[in-house]
Amino acid sequence: EDQVTQSPEALRLQEGESSSLNCSYTVSGLRGLFWYRQDPGKGPEFLFTLYSAGEEKEKERLKATLTKKESFLHITAPKPEDSATYLCAVTDSGNTPLVFGKGTRLSVIA
Amino acid sequence: KAGVTQTPRYLIKTRGQQVTLSCSPISGHRSVSWYQQTPGQGLQFLFEYFSETQRNKGNFPGRFSGRQFSNSRSEMNVSTLELGDSALYLCASSLGVLADEQFFGPGTRLTVL
């Protein structure tokens, strides 16, 4: 059974203080790993898809990387508007439904 | 282009009642998935429809059901509501089969009293 664990559960950063969020996964044949951002009271917003170890993708202050066992979401010089819950999800080669982690709640303080 | 829309946005029901939630996917998207989100369990997959056929179903009791219409709009129904059904119900659409980039709606907040 596919499993996703995200750490830390919550992270508080000062504006400009770079950090990384972790997503470790157990899956039999990774097909794709997905990162989403969710603001309170809203649905998740798609950020990135990663398919193979070594792959990296960037968007503004965010960069996602993938290894064979985990993914990192690096946040460079975060701003208060980056405050949100970041969700990681995986699907395997059997095209099974997305399995989500419980998320990391990020707070960026000005 | 318009995003995924869900109606209603908020619902309050009592135990034993039933409820129907509606989802309109992004124009051109043929796959619709439903998820339940709670603070304790996070996001859990309910079911996925593609071209009016259920392709996958999560580990939920038979009280949870869904369907998809020829225009790709989807509904989910929960019968005999229980207190534990209180959650945010999210719909996501994608162009093709499950695991493509999914776009989520704002959700329906269901409260069961």
Image: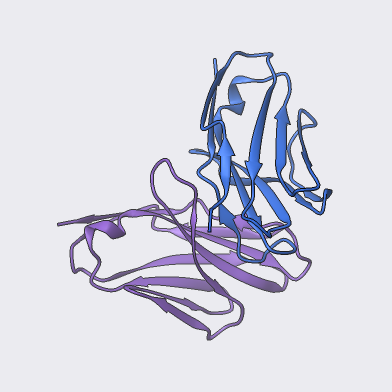
Chain colours: A purple, B blue
Residue plotted at (27% across, 57% down)? A81
Question: Which residue is the extreme one toward the right?
Answer: B53
- Residue A23, image x, y percentages: 49, 65
Q: Which is more toward the observer, B91 or B42?
A: B91
Q: Quadrant of the C terminus of chain B?
A: top right
Asked if residue A63 lies left or right of residue B2, the reply is left
- Residue A11, image x, y percentages: 31, 56
Residue B78: name its quadrant: top right
Q: Which is more toward the observer, A36 or A99?
A: A36
Q: Which is more toward the observer, B29 or A57?
A: B29
- Residue A21, image x, y percentages: 39, 65
Asked if residue B4 lies left or right of residue A59, the reply is right
Residue plotted at (64% across, 50% down)? B25
Asked if residue A95 lies left or right of residue A46, the reply is right
Q: Is residue B65 above or below residue A42?
A: above
Residue plotted at (34% across, 74% down)? A60
- Residue A65, image x, y percentages: 47, 78
Q: Is residue A89 above or below residue A59?
A: above
Question: Which residue is the extreme one toward the left?
Answer: A110
Q: Is residue B14 above or below residue B5?
A: above
Q: Which is more toward the observer, A22 or B28?
A: B28
Q: Number of marks in the image? A: 0
